[in-house]
Each structure stands twice: as structure tokens, then as C-alpha cells.
Image (cartoon, grey):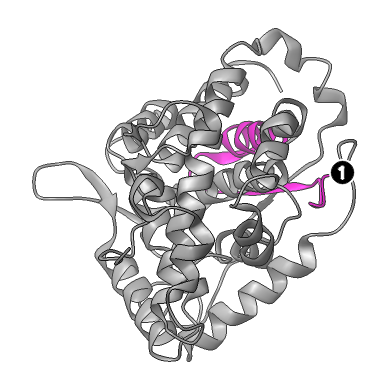
Amino acid sequence: MPIESHRYDPRIHGEPNVFIDALPKDDPKVNLRKSSVLAAAFTPFIRDFQEKISEYTLSKLKSMNEDIEIGIYDYPSYNTPVSEAFYCNISNYSDYFSRFSKVAKSRYLGNRSYDHPLDPLVIVPIGFYEKKFAKATAISGSVLSEVAGKLMKEESNKLLQSPYERTIREETFMPNPYTILAEGMQTVAAGIGLLTSEGIPGYENDPIEGMQQLIDQRVFQHFAAQAPTGVIIPMVISGLRFKEPLVKDDIGNLKVNNTLLDLFKREKQAKSNTGKGRLSEGCPVARPHVPEVTIFGNSDVIPDSGVQMGMEIFMEYLKYYYSVEL
């Protein structure tokens, strides 16, 4: 069957391995196809997590709080001139992002009760909204990372027994899907710390309402789709942050600063030109309207992206932990 699009649809293209292997391995567009296959595999997986966790009441979290490991820290002060997007001097963006990926791999060590290969320490910087917000964000990420392992083992096995297994094992850092989801929850916590480090324009006195607006306006989805993968957690580990990451557009909606998006765009192009586009594709589950993978049920299109669903899950926990005494 001729393939006209690099956006994978199992109802049209059949098995994902055939879809990927239809192009030579050195074709840069192979990475687009792999990313699309990962989106088709993980978007319904996150939707199922959203459904399962809706029955996992917040009262069950009290017993988990004793095992939480988090880190919050103040940003260091930089006296060096700023680059156009970072609070530090960077001369070569591609080399800089490549070093981030190595830091990320070195962090995937340790063990948890459900064979979680992530470092259990969730780190969030203290930004504009001070320690209470940073701590609530870090605890939310830690708890959701743990809950992902408790709830999603069966669905993980389904994916690893499907044709998506090869791409999952070859294209991710993790051995199974529920640890990838757990890492995603940690990345959400770190990403919130980065994007809100200077406050949310118009919501300087109310981070929770500001966060809700960021989610409703799909700002995190847009950011995840544009940011090179393997950047967010290593940036937080390194104590770095973006300069003025959030702004308002002409009609007052929140958005990611165009300066930052331009940087990401140039980085994607640089990676694509060298055939090393995997790091530059952005998060696969940031794309909406992904066709359903039939191993999870109905053959349909899922309207919300996995990132959007993940942010909605995270927000419920963030609101809870921000409202209680920590």
C-alpha cells in the first residue's frame, strides 16, 4: 500500500514496523514516522491512565507521602550576559542540547518497588511562586510517578506484546511503558518549574488559576511539541532556566515566548539536516487527534493529546497538595 503521510494511522498503514521500514534507515523522515508511531501507542495508554486514576481517590495518597523524595532549590544568580533564551551564556546550541541528553541518560538509575529505573528524587526549582508551589509541584510529580507503576502494569504488558514493542524498546530510554509514563510525570513537574519560574503573566498572585489557564489554553501541549526531547529534566538538574518563557499575545492569551520557540525550531532544523532528528522531534504525545490503537479498545480518534491529558491529571494533584499544609 503506498504511504502518503508520515503521520501514522493504524487503520490506513497497518503494522507500525512496516510503516517505519518503508523508508531507508538513513532517511531523516524515519524519525518523524517513529515519533508518530510512539504517539499512536502512548496516547491511548495515557487516556487509560486518566480513566484509572479518576477512581484512585486522593485519600489513598496519605500512605504514599512517607516515601516521597523531592528536591527544591533556589536558582543560582548568573552575572554573565544572557543569551537570547537562557539565563547563561551558550555559544553552541546543538552541542548544549546534546550534553543535556547525556545528563538525562545518566540520571536513569536506581530502583523502586515496581522496577522503576528512574532516580526517585523529583527536583523542582523554586521560582516566582516560592517554596509552597515548588514543593506541591514536586510532590505531585513524585506521587504520580509512583501511581503510574501501580496502575498501568497490565496495559504496559499489552503494549509490549503488540507490534509497537520494537519502537518502544528502540526509541525510548525505558524498558516498559509504565516507567515511560512515570518519567513523563517527573518531566511535567520539572517543566512546570521551568515555565513558571518568572510567574504567569496576569496571575502573579494566583499560581493555581494561572496553571489552569495554561492548561486550558494548551500552552504546555504547544511547548512539549516544540521542545527537543531530553532537555527539561537535565536543565532543572543543572540549575538552568529560560528567560521570560511565558508571555501574552495580542488578545491576552498566554503563550510560550517566540524567542524560545525560534531557538527550538533552529535546533530541530540542525538535527534534521544531519539525519539526527530524534532528539529534535518534540514529545510524541503532544500531538492531538491521534488514531486509537485497537489493542486498547475502540478504533477511533482521540481528540486530546497525551500531554493535555497528562496535564489535566497533574493539575488535580497540584491543586490538592497546594491546598494542604506540607
Q: Position of residue 292 (x, y in %)?
A: 42, 37
Query: Does the magenta portion include 64?
Result: no
Q: Is residue 113 left or right of residue 172?
A: right
Which residue sits at x=39%, y=86%? 270
Evaluate whether residue 242 shows in this view: no
Position of residue 311 in the picture relative to residue 130 (left or right):
left
Write the residue at 58% across / 67% down: 77
For residue 161, above or below residue 235: above
**In terms of secondary structure, where does tag 1 sit?**
loop
Give whichever of 229, 63 is nearer the camera: 229
- In the picture, which quadrant includes the C terminus? top right
Left or right of residue 315: residue 2: left
Residue 250, given in percent of the width and then of the height, sits at 9, 50
The residue stretch that appears in magenta: 115-142
Counting from the top left corner in percent of width and height, residue 184 is at 60, 46
Look at mark 1 in the image and give the residue it sits on.
115
Amino acid marked by disc 1: Asp
Q: Quadrant of residue 225?
A: bottom left
Residue drawn where x is 27% and y is 37% of the image: 217
| In the foreground, 214 or 163 | 163
Q: Is residue 11 above or below residue 7?
A: above
Identify the residue at the far front of this view.
1
Q: Is 94 rendered above or below residue 321? A: below
- Quadrant position of residue 230: bottom right
Q: Is residue 135 magenta?
A: yes
Task: Give the total of numbered labels.
Answer: 1
Label 1 crowd (10 A; few <14 / some 14-19 / many >=20): few
